[in-house]
Image (tube, grey):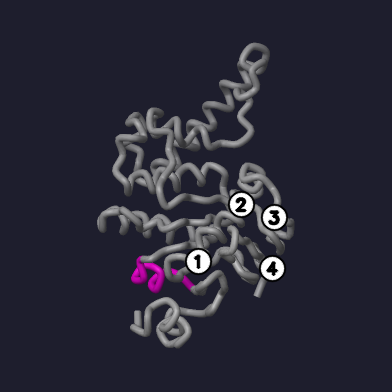
Amino acid sequence: MSNPILQVRDLARSFGALRAVDGINLSVQPATMTGLIGPNGAGKSTLFGLIAGALKPDTGEIVFADHRIDGLSPDRIFRTGLARTFQIPRPFPKMTVLDNVMLAALDQAGEKFWNNWFALGTVRKQEKLIRDRAMEVLGFTGLAAKVNDFAGQLSGGQQKLLELARVLMTDPQLILLDEPAAGVNPALLDTLIDKIIALHARGVGFLIIEHNMDMVMSICNPIVVMAQGRVIFEGDADGVRADQRVLDAYLGGVEP
């Protein structure tokens, strides 16, 4: 096996008396599709928040691409090639789909006030490149026909595709997907899964929180199971179905 792209070592985070993440150790290999499942309250979303920089750990380390990222701000982590989507999409609703995607591009010359006066040619050239890249990404995600629509007008599934398009503007190595199937109709869910599989084939890695067990079992390997802030199992879909700890802690003794 190659060196992990992401390593979580002895990670812990408490909220008062609640130990939401309790000494987690986790490794994600490059370009894999890793599922993260567990009952509500298992600590999955807290773990995502810690990895993405929205929360600070009480103890432990997070290493991404051989660099420690625990303690870094979310924007600095985003720049390393580690991107995150949210269970509830967060677009700018009164901006167009195209503008939402273009906004995600890093290091835009036009963000510096004086460049718009003294380096206008550079700003315009870069903006064209960013627009071209955004159109390419929107074409890939199936949103090319929606470029001039306001993001707030999109359906829930289309907003999930928009979130994916935004993170793709940075060519991430690993994407944290937070319940991509939640609130998505079956037709659009099939499209979303197809895009995830296509990106994985290109070498993009995923760590996916998901309650849709059919989706997890069909596309993820390995699958990591959390309960009460700890990892209780890691393995393939057959192992998840057979492990008694999973059946007891996550599924109440009923086979998935």
Q: Earlier in the sequence, mark 3 or mark 1?
A: 1
**Residue located farthest toward the front when viewing the structure as drawn:** 17
Q: Earlier in the sequence, mark 2 or mark 1?
A: 1
Type of amino acid at the residue the image marks with label 4: Arg
Q: Earlier in the sequence, mark 3 or mark 2?
A: 2
The magenta segment: 212-221
Q: Which residue is mark 1?
A: 33
* Numbered label attached to residue 9: 4
Type of amino acid at the residue the image marks with label 1: Met
Q: Nearer the viewer, mark 4 or mark 2?
A: 2
Q: Residue at x 43, y 79 (%)?
A: 237
Q: Which residue is mark 2?
A: 55
Answer with left or right where residue 69 lies relative to residue 209: right
Q: Determine whether the residue tagged by mark 1 lies in a helix, strand or loop.
A: strand
Q: Nearer the viewer, mark 3 or mark 1?
A: 3
Type of amino acid at the residue the image marks with label 3: Asp
Tell me the distance, in whole angstroms, between the alpha carbons under discs 4 and 2.
16 Å
Q: Earlier in the sequence, mark 4 or mark 1?
A: 4
Type of amino acid at the residue the image marks with label 2: Leu
Q: Determine whether the residue tagged by mark 2 lies in a helix, strand or loop.
A: loop
Q: Are marks 3 and 4 in contact (CB under 8 Å)?
A: no
Is the residue marked by circle 1 packed among few (<14), some (14-19), or many (20+) residues within 10 Å? many
**Residue located farthest toward the top when viewing the structure as drawn:** 117
Q: Residue at x 40, y 48 (%)?
A: 88
Tell me the distance, in whole angstroms, between the alpha carbons under discs 2 and 1.
24 Å
Q: Residue at x 37, y 80 (%)?
A: 252
Q: Are marks 3 and 1 in contact (CB under 8 Å)?
A: no
Is the residue marked by circle 2 packed among few (<14), some (14-19), or many (20+) residues within 10 Å? some
Q: Nearer the viewer, mark 3 or mark 2?
A: 2
Tell me the distance, in whole angstroms, between the alpha carbons under discs 3 and 1.
22 Å
